Image (spheres, helix red, strand yellow):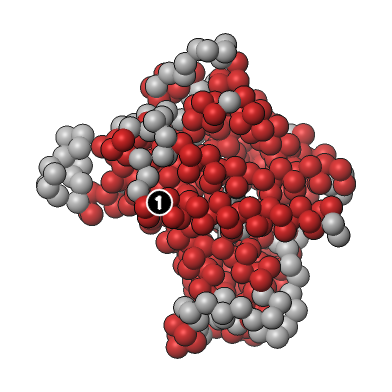
Amino acid sequence: MSAETTVDGSENTGWAGRLRRVGPGVMAAATGVGAGDLVATLVAGSRFGYTLFWAVVLGTVFKLGLGEAVGRWHLGSQRTILAGWRSLGSWATTFFGVYIVIWGFVYGATAMSATGLPLNALFPWLSVRYWGMICGVLGLALVWYGRYRLLERLMTVLVGVMFVAVVGTAVLVGPDLAALGGAVAPRLPDGSLAYVLGLMGGVGGTITMAAYGYWTMAKGWRAPRWIPFMRTDNAVGYITTGIFVVAMLIVGSELLLGQGITDGDQGLLELGGRLAAEYGQWARLPFLVGFLAVTFTSLLGVWNGVSLLFADWWRTWRLPRGESLDSLREHERVALPRSTAYRGYVVWLTVPPMALLFLDKPFQLTIVYGVLGALFMPFLAGTLLFLLNSRRMPAAHRSRWASNTVLTLCLVLFAVLAVHKLFGYFGG
């Protein structure tokens, strides 16, 4: 098919036509990268300089491969990821159901708290807790009433704000491009293994990756002919994410090398203070606005994307044994953002977690949340590797050697990360 032929009568399949339709990949990538991920990169830069740049590059490649696999499953098989998991047996849907319920309760409080931090720094007359609640309710209203096109446009604007703030800060501190280029070759300084694993497997890698296929459906991509568009969209999203992460590595290397910084969302506030001390308030305030954009995109993307996942899980779970799942078009009829399950999960993300904003997270709940979270990414990589090479996928769209290599490496990496986290919880 030439670059001038059309897929749907209005758009060509050349690069210009593909780039005009970019959107779901930007949403997925921006949602997956939160404030904690940027701080982890900042801390890595402050301890090891540019040395771990290669790990950021590999991490971007891994997420790009996973995102492409999720999108290709939806478009190639014309079924949702929940339909694929159901075909593996009840264990898969049971695990995911338990995970998404617990994850949503804890993450709701985490997201609201993270969004409240920069707002409290900008407008200290209201506490972090109440700013977070306001953001949670605002997110609920936007995904309750807003259609996909509105959410995509809003998220794209916020990503633009993130880009200007984060990359602008990296330019301000003055990157050493020669040192950055020299860090492409893998090196493991003493004590860096945990940071390497985190940069490769943690940044941008969450349950939101599984939501990507639902955003491609909302965009109107429902058949294999949209796979080229999806691949361009996915690449733009994760390359943009990679640029964010590299920018934070530069900031950590140039501004904080050899200095301590808090390993958590609070670390971005500390960075804002150091920018003010070094360059003045004019550098701090735009960075805090960018910090707010980072946290609110994560909140908004989860409120929408993971709620779509839950609505589909609820539909799948309730189907009688032996009854087959319907096509994507049938899914849209029963699991649209107007469904009771979708709206119920949005409320679950917003209202009950507000109680955790008044208390420390219960220890037992935190343990369960951490264990299930550690197991989800190996679950996603492993099931995609199996589904995309099985008869469930039309032969023309099954994985080739490149995709299988990336998915296998992802499975190994996330399995190692899972063991590392589980040992941290139970082995001290």
x%, y% of residue 135? Answer: 66, 45
Which quarter of the rendered picture does the C terminus lie within? bottom right
Which quarter of the rendered picture does the N terminus lie within? top left
Could you tell me the amino acid type at mark 1? Ser
In the picture shown, does residue 355 fall above or below 194? above
In the picture shown, does residue 332 fall above or below 13? above
Instruction: Bin the neighbour count of mark 1 within 10 Å (Cα to Cα): few under 14, some 14-19, many 20 and up.
Output: some
**SS at badge 1:** helix
For the residue pair 247 and 188, the one nearer the viewer reads as: 188
x%, y% of residue 65? Answer: 44, 53
Q: Is residue 139 left or right of 219 when viewed as pictured? A: right
- The answer to whether any part of residue 295 appears in the image is no
For the residue pair 155 and 224, the one nearer the viewer reads as: 224
For the residue pair 283 and 155, the one nearer the viewer reads as: 155
In the picture shown, does residue 136 fall above or below 124? above
**Could you tell me which residue is drawn at 43 percent across and 45 percent down?**
69
Q: Quadrant of residue 108?
A: top right
Q: Is residue 411 left or right of 347 when viewed as pictured? A: left
Q: Is residue 295 left or right of 395 when viewed as pictured? A: right
**Could you tell me which residue is drawn at 81 percent across and 46 percent down?**
367
**Could you tell me which residue is drawn at 39 percent across and 30 percent down?**
391
Q: Quadrant of residue 178?
A: bottom left
**Could you tell me which residue is drawn at 64 percent across and 81 percent down?**
189
Count of numbered marks:
1
x%, y% of residue 171? Answer: 48, 79
For the residue pair 368 and 127, the one nearer the viewer reads as: 368
- The answer to whether any part of residue 202 appears in the image is yes
x%, y% of residue 311? Answer: 57, 26
Q: Which residue is mark 1?
A: 403
